[in-house]
Amino acid sequence: MVDLGQNNLHGNVPTWLGESLSSLLFLRLRSNSFSGAIPPQICNLSSLQILDLANNYLTGHIPECIGNFSNMVINPNASQQALHVMEYRIDAGDLGDFMLPNYKYSLPLVKNGMEREYTNNLPLVTNMDLSSNSLVGEIPQSLLRLLGLQSLNLSENHLTGNIPSKIGDLRSMVSLDLSRNELSGQIPPSLSDLNFLGYLNLSFNNLSGRIPTGNQLQTLNDASIYMGNFNLCGPPISQECTDDGPSQSPSFTSEDNKDEAGDGQEILWLFLGIAPGFVLGFWMVWGILLFKRNWRIAYFLRLDNLFM
């Protein structure tokens, strides 16, 4: 294991890691200031079970060769792994060939949205965390080869395109975080095939369409999983899908329609009752004044007295 996490290292991710440590099982470089692209030499670490490059300033695309990690293709067998841990703590500066070995048997990892310390069960874990960088492009299809991958965190990048349609092939997946990217299109129905999935976060993307249901997704009914995707619809969020028929506002139901129709009819009958009476009364007064000369004279004299 190489753990260089939470130092003040900067520059590019060193290529010698992939050239000299081909049998490396665990690589943790998170929370530094590494920049530039993920070097393709990292893909030479075919025995990797844990790759943690989170919280750096990495740019560019996720290399297609990221699917070459054979220990993530099948579930690791603890009885076949010998764990040799070397943790390096360097105050600051570029990472060269300077190494200070310190043996231990634990590693902090972020899984299910929380950081925890893995010790004796570490050889059983497969984890890839590239979150909180500035990676662009689409999620590589080669990731779908990593059938033993248990935790994948690509959140807080600038990834675009669709979620791979066959992501349900990753049957060992326990934790999946693709939040805060620019992913678009529909959520693949195959996501419901991830029977061990206990943590899912797809929030703040540009996803659209109906949210898949069934199988394991039935247990993940938290609306916050999908928040910030304004074109999604269906449970567990409140937005109904238009192909379910026209939706009505909760404050305007069919009962409201009946009440409003009844109110309109009452107003109509009231108007029909008042209007003829008004017309009849109006013409009765003016008819009398028109045909009764003495009443007409008295009426206009009364008006003159009012305004003088």
Image (spheres, rainbow, N blue to C red):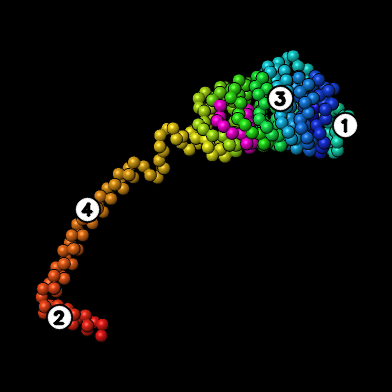
Badge 4 vs badge 1, beta-carbon distance below 8 Å: no
Q: In the rendered image, which quarter is residue 124 located in?
A: top right
**Range of residues picked out in magenta:** 175-188
Q: Camera-side residue: 61 or 123?
A: 61
Q: Amino acid at mark 4?
A: Trp
* Residue 186 shown in magenta: yes
Element carrying mark 1: loop
Relative side of 10 to 132, left or right = right
Point out the tag, 1 or 2, that comes first from the N-terminus.
1
Point out the tag, 3 or 2, that comes first from the N-terminus.
3
- Dot 2, how many residues are within 10 Å of its Cα: few (below 14), some (14-19), or many (20+)? few
Point out the tag, 4 or 1, that comes first from the N-terminus.
1
Q: Amino acid at mark 2?
A: Ile
Measuring 60% from the left and 24% from the top, which residue is drawn there? Answer: 167
Q: Position of residue 295 (x, y in %)?
A: 12, 77
Look at mark 3 in the image and give the residue it sits on.
Answer: 64
For the residues labelled 4 and 2, the Cα–Cα distance comes to 39 Å
